């Protein structure tokens, strides 16, 4: 694992320290890693949504479509 040193104003360091204590993180590094992972996940989701929005329509999302999706789930009996 690599190490990164960051500088924070006192007010932000206090905020991070409070979050670590209140939310049960072991260290400030754990808290910051969580925030970075969440930001990475948000960016990934944003890219997926934009790609989907710019793609051509695939067809209607009607009962036939959803029944076909349900049929693809292993071990699921159709009602």
Image (spheres, rainbow, N blue to C red):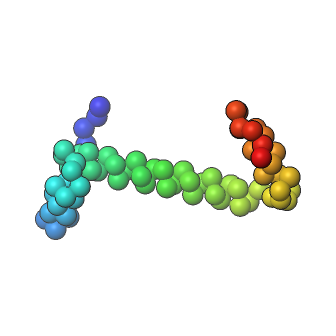
Task: Looking at the picture, tell me which residue is in the foreground, 75 or 54.
Answer: 75
Where is residue 61? Give x, y as percent. 81, 58
Residue lying at the far bottom of the rendered structure: 11
Instruction: Please indicate whether residue 77 sits to the left or right of residue 59 in the image.
Output: left
Where is residue 50? Give x, y as percent. 65, 59
Instruction: Please indicate whether residue 46 sits to the left or right of residue 51 in the image.
Output: left
Number of marks drawn: 0
Residue lying at the far front of the rendered structure: 79
Q: Is residue 30 visible?
A: yes
Instruction: Please indicate whether residue 36 sits to the left or right of residue 66 in the image.
Output: left
Q: Residue at x 83, y 56 (%)?
A: 63
Task: Looking at the picture, tell me which residue is in the foreground, 22 or 68.
Answer: 68
Where is residue 68? Give x, y as percent. 81, 45
Task: Looking at the picture, tell me which residue is in the foreground, 37 or 6.
Answer: 37
Which quarter of the figure has residue 76? top right
Q: Residue at x 51, y 54 (%)?
A: 43
Where is residue 41? Give x, y as percent. 48, 50
Q: Is residue 8 visible?
A: no
Q: Residue at x 70, y 33 (%)?
A: 74
Task: Looking at the picture, tell me which residue is in the foreground, 59 or 33.
Answer: 59
Q: Name the quarter where the N terminus is drawn.
A: top left
Q: Residue at x 86, y 52 (%)?
A: 64
Instruction: Please indicate whether residue 38 sits to the left or right of residue 2 in the image.
Output: right
Q: Is residue 3 above or below residue 6?
A: above
């Amino acid at each position: 694992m690599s190490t990164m040193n960051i500088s924070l104003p006192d007010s932000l360091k206090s905020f991070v320290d409070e979050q670590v204590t209140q939310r049960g993180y072991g260290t400030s590094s754990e808290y910051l890693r969580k925030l970075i992972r969440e930001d990475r996940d948000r960016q990934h989701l944003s890219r997926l949504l934009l790609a989907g929005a710019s793609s051509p329509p695939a067809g209607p999302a009607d009962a036939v479509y959803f029944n076909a999706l349900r049929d693809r789930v292993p071990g699921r009996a159709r009602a």
